Image: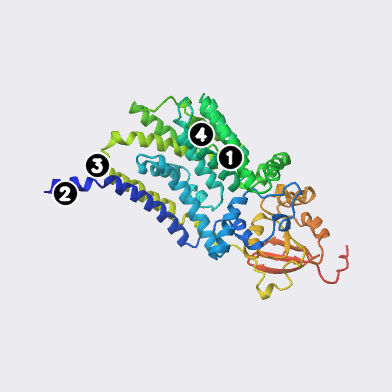
Amino acid sequence: MMMNNGAALQRYVPLACWMAVLLTAMLICLKILAYGFMPPGDARRHVAKPFAHKPYSEIIVMRPQYVVDHSPGWEWILGILHRTAGWDEDALISFSVASLALFVLCFPLIWMRHPEAWLAAVLAQTIAIPDLMTRWTQGRPYLLTEGILMAMLFSWSKEQDRQPPWWKAALTCLGFALSVWMHGAWYLWILLFAAFFLAQRWRAGLWLAGCWVVGTIVGALLTGQPLAFLQGAVFMAKSIYEEHAPKWLLVGEFQPSTGEFASILTLAIIYLWRQRQNKASSPLFSQPVVWMIAINWILGMTADRFWADWGVAAAIVWMAGEIDQAMPTLWNESSLQRLAACGCIVLPLFLLSSNDMGRRYTAWMTEPFLDGSNPQLKDWMPGKGGIFYADNMQFFYNTFYKNPQGDWRYMVGFEPALMPPDDLKIYREMHRSEGGAASYEPWIKKMRLQDRLAVARSSQPDLPELDWKEGAHGLWVGRLPATPRPPARK
């Protein structure tokens, strides 16, 4: 009787594994959101944009060449949810975090015979890169591109030297179109074709390139300003490159990686394990996914975003494929051993991904936010048509999030390279001099009565030309005095 019960239970092992994997992905997102998590950076401006009812040219002082934002599709979706469902900023933040994290966690499962193999690869990479889940919960549309990249590596790497079915080509065009419309970095997909060509998968690479051309055109057309959109994305990348600023002055994703030793070691262990089994799939460098890892590992030495957004995705795809192929040699599909192993994967992944290590999910609670509706800040926010100068990008994200309908513009927005050239030089000098008082003088001389200067300091800034008020903890707002002061005596 017990044997019969055991056999009956084993019938449900594959289903139980699927349920455990999907439930783990959802619980990770729910636990992170339960902290009240608000991702830093671009997620905040994307959420605030539907409430602003104006283009970025009326929100940020920027060069005229940048006309269309590089993520119009994502902001369109957030706008629809705001207008039709009445979602506020908190609801849109939660949606951004959960939907995009679940996309990268669950979408690749379509290509998995054993879903726990996918989470095993994610767990291995999370151990190697503890901040992986922090990156995957940023609520930014690059995660949609990352999920689409994983899908294309899974589905096209096994494509033989033949014409793919029409539906596969159509879905691939759709994937490219969504990536371009939602994320905008259309030119980076060239890395994928390079990987296929280096692996000598010529036919698959050419088909992907053709689908990319179609998808890019469709995605650009969806913006309503296709040429300006395509040119704007290239202009931003070109502006960053041509500035030749020291790497330490750039945002984190444009700074070089350290070589990611732990990730490379993890990949090597998986490879040697498979070699020992004599079950390695195919020669390494005949696999496009391996070339994708190599290309982006090398490019990561210049800018970490290549490795963080593209190389890591390819590494997880390769590891998941190897583990998926190895699992039938380890235990039977319906074995209780498989269910136990699945538990040994999903439980540590949940605990590792959802804990608040280093306050990664709660650090935002101590950030300073200026709220223009606060009566104490009356007359301290910029006047109509004014400009908010600031010495850091986080000020824009936080203040725009709290005041999306503010009747002013920000000098420093989501990418310093888009600032007018003279103002960019002033901004860079502030950082080179580590906030030296003299570096603020050019902006103070440009300020009008309706303008304001925000400076992050523990005490009042030593800039006597302005009146000052601490608008939030450690954040000072300066304005010109109504009556000009006589110059200080020397």
Q: Which residue is mark 3?
A: 335
In front of the other: 134 or 156 = 156
Q: Work out whether mark 1 precedes mark 3 in sequence or the reverse, and give the earlier one.
A: 1
Q: Residue at the spot x=71%, y=58% of the render?
A: 59
Callout 1: helix, strand or loop?
helix
* Mark 4 neighbour class, 10 Å CA radius: few under 14, some 14 to 19, many 20 or more: many
User: Disc 3 and disc 4: Cα gap in Å?
Assistant: 34 Å
Image quarter for residue 464?
Answer: bottom right
Give the number of the mark in front: 3 or 2: 2
User: Disc 1 and disc 3: Cα gap in Å?
Assistant: 44 Å
Image quarter for residue 112?
Answer: top left
Q: Work out whether mark 3 precedes mark 4 in sequence or the reverse, and give the earlier one.
A: 4
Callout 4: helix, strand or loop?
helix
Give the number of the mark in front: 4 or 2: 2
Say if residue 255 shows up in the picture.
no
The kind of residue on which mark 4 rests is Ile
In front of the other: 152 or 406 = 152
Q: Which residue is mark 2?
A: 5
The kind of residue on which mark 3 rests is Ser
The kind of residue on which mark 2 rests is Asn
Q: Which residue is mark 1?
A: 215
* Mark 3 neighbour class, 10 Å CA radius: few under 14, some 14 to 19, many 20 or more: some
User: Disc 1 and disc 2: Cα gap in Å?
Assistant: 52 Å
Name the side, left or right, on which 165 lies relative to 382.
left
Q: Work out whether mark 1 precedes mark 4 in sequence or the reverse, and give the earlier one.
A: 1
Q: Which residue is mark 4?
A: 293
Q: How is the image coloured?
A: rainbow
Toward the left, the furthest residue is 1
